[in-house]
Amino acid sequence: MTDRAFPPKKRVGILISGGGSNMAALIAAARSPDYPAEIVRVISNKPAAQGLEKARAAGVATAVVDHRSFATREDFDRAVHADLIAAGVEIVCMAGFMRIVSPWFAGQWRDRMLNIHPALLPSYTGLHTHARALRDGVKIHGCTVHVVRVELDVGPIIMQAAVPVLDDDTEATLAARVLTQEHRIYPAALALVASGRAKVVARPDGGEMVRVAGASETAAALVVPMNRN
Ligand code: GRF
């Protein structure tokens, strides 16, 4: 019985600031023997982030780099960078990381740093995405995993999931529906990047996109409300 030869797993560092549910989803996915990445480091800018305890319980090495200890954004980023490099990290996943990265840091990890945003980018960049979507009366909302660029919540899109918005939704019910999909697409998107199947390419129209090698399944169209007449 010959072992299937797997390429070495990409070493991943996760940046958090809070509960870390997306971090937990990535850690859980990486437990699979044929997952193309291993989670080797979790760094929080907040000492009290509950995600740190989840990471430790899962046996993942953690660090706190408290942004309040640094004079400038870049000084903080350089400290985070040094910790990532020391851990041999090759791909960075921001997961509920409530910091705007410096141009220097975004440059160091160009095309190797991902983020999860709770909206269908480029719609609803920034904060309070669910409340804004409800206020606008949209019928379809969702989440996006994208490659990080300097500009906030902008960058080549790797994967998105769409969910229906229901008439009686609250911010909490909509957020929960989106979060379920975040936990589904982040591990899937990281696997595409870690395996080399997803590549950022320049488009002839001047934009950027992420091309995924090989057939990628697509879901049927989401129509809301579904008018069954
Ligand atoms: C999620 O909606 C995520 O998209 C946003 O923060 C929320 C909590 O994330 N960035 P997590 O539970 O800390 O991963």
Image (cartoon, grey):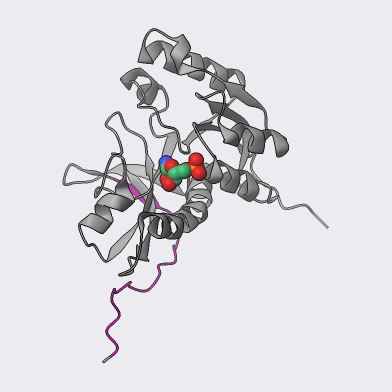
Q: Quadrant of residue 70?
A: top left
Q: Quadrant of residue 156?
A: top left
Residue occupying the far bottom of the picture: 229
Main secondary structure found in the magenta portion: loop
Q: Quadrant of the C terminus?
A: bottom left
Q: Determine whether 189 is above or below 42 in the image.
A: below
Residue occupying the far right of the picture: 1
Indicate the position of residue 168 as horizontal and vertical percent values.
Answer: 33, 68
47 left or right of 123 in image? right
For the point 67% across and 28% down, which residue is it?
61
Q: Determine whether 37 is above or below 42 in the image.
A: below
Locate ligand 1 by image quadrant.
top left
124 left or right of 98 in image? left
Magenta segment includes 65: no
The answer to which of 17 and 210 lies nearer the viewer is: 17
The answer to which of 180 and 84 lies nearer the viewer is: 180
For the point 64% across and 48% down, which residue is it?
28
* Residue 195 visible (yes or no): no
Indicate the position of residue 15 as horizontal and vertical percent values.
Answer: 50, 31
The answer to which of 64 and 209 lies nearer the viewer is: 64
Q: How many marks?
A: 0
- Span colored in magenta: 209-228
Indicate the position of residue 40 as horizontal and vertical percent values.
Answer: 64, 32
Residue occupying the far top of the picture: 71
For the point 45% across and 17% down, which residue is it?
67
The answer to which of 63 and 69 lies nearer the viewer is: 69
